[in-house]
Amino acid sequence: MTVLSNKLRMECCNYMDKDSEGIMRCKLFLMIGITFIGVIIITREASAYLDLGTGSYIFQLFIAFIIGGLYAVKLFWKRIFFFIRNVFRKK
């Protein structure tokens, strides 16, 4: 557990600013990371099941993600086109 928390601390300190807001973000990141790792390590058995509606729900989420992405491309097509054109434009 100590090795994991040291790794998290090192990763967090790379992103930490010198101000107090950066320090607070770093501490929050460490607390969430250590809690998440602790929950995963402590949990032994999950008494959960997938009911019949789970597959259809996941399918609906997948379809909504695809359609939402296509709609976002439609809305921002000009910006995307000009960005790609500027990236590959010869100088």
Image (spheres, rainbow, N blue to C red):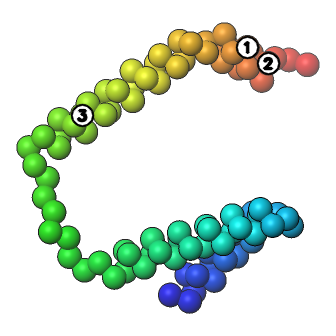
Q: Is residue 45 visible?
A: yes
Q: Secondary structure at mark 3?
A: helix
- Cα separation between marks 1 and 2: 6 Å
Quick one: label 3 or label 1, which is nearer the N terminus?
Answer: 3
Camera-near label (3 vs 1) is 3
* Left or right of residue 9, residue 36 in this image: left
Residue bearing mark 1: 82
Q: Is residue 10 above or below residue 75?
A: below
Find residue 8 and report its image quarter.
Answer: bottom right
Question: Circle 1 sits in a helix, a strand or a loop, which is it?
Answer: helix
Residue occupying the point 52% across, 19% down: 72
Q: Nearer the viewer, residue 86 or 40?
A: 40
Residue at 75% x, 69% y: name it: 23
Residue projecting furthest to the bottom: 2
Mark 3 surroundings within 10 Å by alpha-carbon count, few (fewer than 14), some (14 through 19), many (20 or more): few
How far from the left and from the top, in percent, is residue 80? 66, 18
Q: Amino acid at mark 3?
A: Phe
Residue type of the residue flagged with mark 2: Asn
Q: Decide: few, some or many residues near mark 2? Use Cα within 10 Å; few <14, some 14-19, many ≥20.
A: few
Residue annotated with mark 3: 59
